[in-house]
Amino acid sequence: MISINMQEQVENSSVIRAMFEEGKRLAEIHGTENVFDFSLGNPNAEPPEEVNKAILEILKTESLMSIHGYMNNSGYEEVRAAIAESINNKFGTAFTENNIIMTVGAAGGLNVIFKTLLNPKDEVITFAPFFGEYRSYVKNYEGNLVVVPPNTIDFQPNLKEFEALITPITKAVIINSPNNPTGVIYSEETIIKLAEILREKQQEFGTDIYIISDEPYRELAYDNAEVPYLSKYYANTIIGYSFSKSLSLPGERIGYLVIPDQAADYDNIVSAANMANRILGYVNAPSLFQRVVAKCLNAKVDIDTYNRNRELLYKGLSSYGYQCIKPQGAFYMFVKAPIVSDSEFCNLAKEKNILIVPGTPFGCPGYFRIAYCVAYQTIENALPGFKALIEEVK
């Protein structure tokens, strides 16, 4: 018999993954070209050429044991130093390799830091809509996820309600910008005010409250939009980054945590995070791809691929009468369902072989998410179905 905790997890398993599996089933019936799968944020832009060059260079010039052996739990010193220097050059920070811990993607990094920080019943606040797996990540360590209701006007965080939800057992706040599922970038004004609130609450309660900034989409920002680097605004910031989207390497599971010197209890957090890396079973991040990303820190995927999709989808849906905020980053569009039930609308879409994800699992009922990291032709071919859908339910 599996644990009660896992019974609950299985029963509430990811709607996104379930929809992805449904897409594969429908493709076998109707043909891949006739199924329009917008369920999963699986990058379709090719990795930069620098990635392949780096792999070949490493395999040709380094010994197998240096490529495939164990290393410090934090990761290779030279890789961490290169990442720290890259961050410093981009954002005017002053990190060293001692501020970087290599992780098994952003998800692995979040689990490491939650294992490090959370006591049973500690509260972690996040802003709806949010990536649904946060629920499981916090619950893994017996914490409680506290959700700030969505601001559906512009999807910036609802700071008034946020302030009211902070308590003496609030341990952390998860920020995800550019946001999954909305594509919204949290403005500098929002970040400044949020930091002010947290500093006041820390003083009021005599506690440390950490911002955990989940940043897999940082490099995917359109129209020259700026994504604030949170450690510059708030001392107790820990940043989780992934190369899954910036280099189109989701299956390689490679990312890092940034733990600034000024974070409260810095020395103990770093020591505990390294221990968490071990006892959670990661041991260390994948060795080959640590070395690969260190050679590709200035490389990026062709964001124009996603921007073309964004423009086509936004113009098409808007012309049909759908309501949504135009994404500033990432590769998701969060659209208001034209009927009350987002789940029912997604089921209607599935009848036309269009796979989209309801907003309820993101903490925002009445909306649905479209992952537009697909072929341009997929969007072209799906748009008539979206038009027919809204006409049928009006």
Image (cartoon, helix red, strand yellow):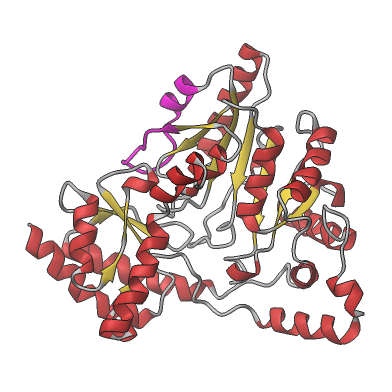
Q: Is residue 82 left or right of residue 112?
A: right
Q: Residue at x 60, y 18 (%)?
A: 200
Residue 148 included in the magenta stretch of the image? yes
Q: x and y percent of residue 82 in the render? A: 83, 61
- 240 over 298 or under it: above or below: above
Q: Residue at x 61, y 27 (%)?
A: 120
- 145 over 44 or under it: above or below: above
Q: Is residue 288 left or right of residue 202?
A: right
Q: x and y percent of residue 95 in the render? A: 82, 47
Which residue in the rendered view is the most extreme toward the front?
Answer: 1
- Residue 314 or 6: which is nearer the viewer? 6
Residue 137 included in the magenta stretch of the image? no
Q: Which residues are magenta?
A: 147-165
- Residue 201 or 276: which is nearer the viewer? 276
Q: x and y percent of residue 163 in the render? A: 48, 22
Q: Is residue 256 left or right of residue 291?
A: left
- 72 over 135 or under it: above or below: below
Q: Quadrant of the C terminus?
A: bottom left
Which quadrant would residue 276 be assigned to in this image?
top right
Count of picture labels: 0
Q: Residue at x 37, y 33 (%)?
A: 149
Q: x and y percent of residue 124 in the render? A: 55, 32
Viewer can see residue 92: no
- 167 over 24 or under it: above or below: above
Q: Residue at x 26, y 70 (%)?
A: 354
- Residue 278 or 126: which is nearer the viewer? 278
- Residue 103 or 247: which is nearer the viewer? 103
Viewer can see residue 299: yes
